[in-house]
Image (tube, rainbow, N blue to C red):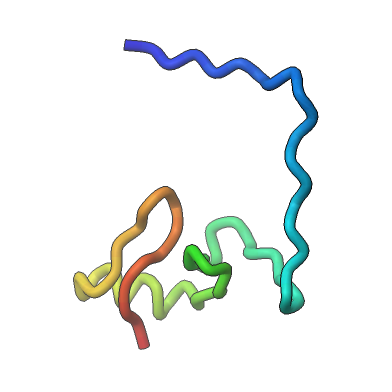
Amino acid sequence: MYLLVYPSLTTPPRAKTASQPSRQAAVGVDFVTPDGIIVPRAAGEAALLGHTAVLIGGLLVGFWS
């Protein structure tokens, strides 16, 4: 089964402005939560290994310290 994705011919929606200054996450360095919080790599990996967090669509969801 293949999923074909075609680009939209309409204009893309505008990005919402962040209420707090945002910081770009470095690829492969930190984790990002669904609400945009940057979690340090060590804390994220410890939570994943301790089964207190999961990655959903590349976002870290769960508990970490």
Please state, as top left, top right, bottom left or bottom right, where the N terminus lies in the image: top left
Estimate the x, y position of residue 28 in percent, counting from the top left.
53, 58
Q: Residue 5 appears at what percent x and percent y?
A: 54, 18
Q: Is residue 28 left or right of residue 10?
A: left
Number of marks in the image?
A: 0
Side (left or right) of 61 relative to 26: left
- Rendered position, 4 above or below 49: above
- In the rendered image, the residue lying farthest to the bottom is 65
Q: Quadrant of residue 26 in the image?
A: bottom right
Q: Residue at x 35, y 71 (%)?
A: 45
Q: Is residue 1 left or right of residue 12?
A: left
Q: Nearer the viewer, residue 58 or 12?
A: 12
Q: Residue furthest left?
A: 51
Q: Residue at x 67, y 20 (%)?
A: 7
Residue 53 drawn at (x, y percent): 29, 69
Residue at the (68%, 21%) spot, across then down? 8
Instruction: State the image quarter where residue 48 is shown.
Output: bottom left
For the C terminus, which image quadrant?
bottom left
Q: Determine whether 51 is above or below 65 in the image.
A: above
Please state the horizontal and vertical placement of residue 3, each as a whole percent of the image.
Answer: 43, 16
Which residue is at the front of the view, 60 or 42? 60
Query: Based on the displayed image, in which of its 4 quarters is residue 6 positioned?
Result: top right
